[in-house]
Each structure stands twice: as structure tokens, then as C-alpha cells.
Amino acid sequence: MKKNKNNYLEIINTIERIRSKNNVNWMDVLRLAFKHAPKEASQLMKKVNSEDKRISFLLKKLSSIKKDFNE
């Protein structure tokens, strides 16, 4: 079981490194968008933020499900 746990942790660490690099790319795209088309970029960010809120809500639901299983 410990070997599986280490494999999962290794995969998670790899994902973290990739996401870190991609977050830099995402911020570069955001800067470029606001530099060249601030109004349009703002409208798009409003949509992105709205979808992020939906994702956060779903993640909260998943967290509460886990809590229910532990009790």
C-alpha cells in the first residue's frame, strides 16, 4: 500500500510542477489581453470568474461528501 501511496504523491507532485509553469503562461496571456484589449479581456475574465465560482461550489460539495464518509 505504501508503494501506491508514493506513486500517487509522485504524480501529484508532477502535476503541481506542471501547473506552476502553466500558471505563469496563463498570467502572461492575461497581461497581453489587458494590454491590447482591456475591455474585451475584462468581459472574458468576468466569465472565467463565474465558471470558477461554479467549480468552487462543486469542490465544496465533494469535500462535504468526504466528510460524510468519514463520520
Image (cartoon, grey):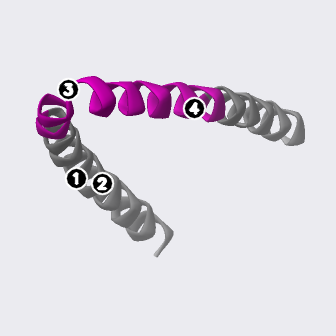
Circle 4 SS class: helix
Q: Which residue is mark 4?
A: 24
Q: Viewed as shown, does residue 50 lie left or right of 33?
A: left
- Amino acid carrying mark 3 in the image: Ala
Nearer the camera: disc 4 or disc 3: 3
Q: Which residue is mark 2?
A: 56
Nearer-N-terminus badge (2/3): 3
Callout 1: helix, strand or loop?
A: helix
Task: Identify the mark nearer the N-term, 1 or 4.
Answer: 4
State the separation of the CA atoms marked 1 and 4: 21 Å
Label 2, secondary structure: give it. Answer: helix
Of label 4 and label 3, which has the lower sequence position? 4
Q: Which residue in the structure is indicated by mark 1?
A: 53
Vertical placement of residue 16 versus 69, above or below: above
Compare residues 69 and 49 and report the one nearer the observer. 49
For marks 4 and 2 on the same chain, the one whose residue lies earlier in the sequence: 4
Q: Which residue is mark 3?
A: 37
Q: Nearer the viewer, mark 4 or mark 2?
A: 4
Region rendered in magenta: 19-43
